[in-house]
Image (cartoon, grey):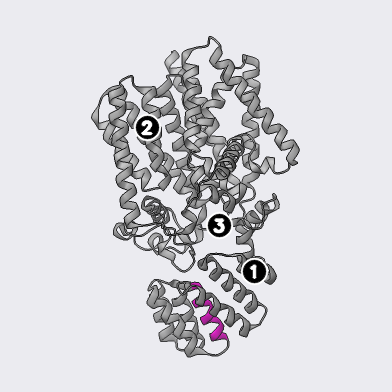
Amino acid sequence: MKPIVEKIVFFSFWIGLIALCLWVYKPALSGDFILDAHYIVDQNPLVKQTLSLKEIFTHDFFSAYKSSFYRPLQYYRPLVTLSLGLNYHWLGPQPIWFRLVNIYIHLLNTFLIFVLFQLLFKEKSLSLLSAFFFCLLPIHEWVVNYVVGRTDLLQAFFSLISLVGLVLYLQKKKIVFYFVSLIAFICALLSREAAIMLPAFILLGSLFASDSKKQIFSVFCSFCVVSIIYYFIRLITFPVVSNESLVQFSMQSVMSTSLLVLDYLLRFIYPWTVSYRWPAEVKLIIYVVSYFSLILFCYRMVRSNIETVNKRVIGFSFFWLLISVMPFFITRDMFHKLGPSLSEHFLYWSAIGFSLFLSVFVLRLPRILRMSSFVLIVYYFCWTGFSNNQNWTSEEYLLSQVVAKGEHSQTVAQQQLLMKYKENLKAVEVMIGYSKERYEKSLWFRRKGFILRQQGNSVEATKAFRQAIAVNEENLDARNSLAISLLEQGRIKEGEGWLRATLKKDSQNFDAYRILGMSSFFRKNYSRSLKYFNDRE
């Protein structure tokens, strides 16, 4: 009778968690595509047309829509593109289906976390509670709701499968689990470059799953070899050529990044949407008290005569967090550019270690405090997450809410608001002067031209579009905008010439076909118009 009751409780737990997760993310389901999702999904021929594995695996993540991506950072994430393509063809083009699949993958990751911790620590209550906390953490807002957050989700999914497979191999000595682990690791690398850090977690998991140092060393070395091979093939095939990727290390930069890490590790408890309201002095006091309490708790755990398993769990969670924040020292400039809200998506993988630590903390409390703490934590996580997700009704509203929470003028949210929604010519001219890379400067010249055109100043708009092209000849959007401006001035031949030149550079540029079709239609050349519209399809 007892096993049946346990199974009912187990399945009830997961049904309840799924329902709670769907409730938390429900407000965001009806929202539009935002930011890069327009280019990665909505305007991406690799996703929208017939899926071609050859095309997907031979192009970088942003290559399919050359006209809008202004940095030559060649992310290689073919499995993400493939999953988005399958999503588009099987379920439809609406954003809700992409977000529902993201939630589904997030729930799969939650279950895999339970499996991993159960295999390592054999404590079902600890494993379930860790998975529960991980699933509902409010910092997952951008990973789950943002369609391009699929990269983080798939990297975590395949990485967790790899870790689970490895632990099973070490415990059951069946070689099939080793190959499953290795294949999953390769899939993680093809989902997001950050998976190259997985061998460090493989080593951590192996140390807790096996006592054979020889076996641990051989497994770790094999994964390191795969990482090295991937790194060199990746570097040769899709080199990172942006200056932004070159990180300069100094004592000052290491210290500033260390402070950044300390700040972001507390985002699990105090996400930016909560802490932005605090004055600097209050925030400092809260952070100092929080870290002091955590250190005191860990010290008492180590010094006390509690079960060895709890000490092992504390050690595992500590090293997980330590390893997971190492990439921060390389990607620190991205935190500044993305801003304190968007950059919380970097914590998705780290959240696994935090969830485990929080579970140990709650389970060590007296019974009455344990239940009340659990209820308060769940209420806090769910309400914070639900409130944040209500901002995802449209891109403009979401970005406005992000900027309203105290972000400075050079973050992605602020720039995108100015680029797409705010017609502030003076602010755009400031951004033109601020931009260092020609790709970015070209985008701002195009935005200037668009604002001038909206104001009816076609001559100055045409000049701005020409400046955008002069700065970056590959800005196909600027070419199309210039063509529209020329067509509106009656310079048909010159305008259509620019559009045909665009199609020579990118034969799949849908906007160029659309504008040519509209131009022919207004001149009552219906047969040519139909031809252009058919070519667009």
Location of residue 254 (image quadrant): top right
Label placed on residue 85: none
Q: Pick the residue in front: 340 or 251.
A: 251
Please give the residue where the numbered disc 3 appears in the rendered image: 34
Asked if residue 486 is among those painted magenta in the image, a careful observer would answer yes
Secondary structure at numbered mark 1: helix
Number of the front mark, 2 or 3: 2
Whether residue 440 is situated above or below residue 232 in the rendered picture? below
Asked if residue 221 is among those painted magenta in the image, a careful observer would answer no
Label placed on residue 428: 1
- Residue 158 visible here: yes
Local packing at callout 2 (Cα closer than 10 Å; few below 14, some 14-19, many 20+) is: many
Q: Amino acid at mark 1?
A: Val
Whether residue 15 is situated above or below residue 345 in the rendered picture? above
Identify the magenta region.
Answer: 477-488
Q: Amino acid at mark 3?
A: Ile
Separation of residues labelled 1 and 3 (CA atoms): 21 Å
Q: Amino acid at mark 2?
A: Ile
Whether residue 25 is situated above or below residue 218 in the rendered picture? below
Q: Name the side, left or right, on which 272 lies relative to 127.
A: right
Whether residue 296 is situated above or below residue 48 in the rendered picture? above
Q: Name the side, left or right, on which 476 lies relative to 400.
A: left
Local packing at callout 1 (Cα closer than 10 Å; few below 14, some 14-19, many 20+) is: many
Please give the residue where the numbered disc 2 appears in the rendered image: 202
State the image coordinates of residue 498 (x, y, percent, origin top left).
Answer: 46, 82
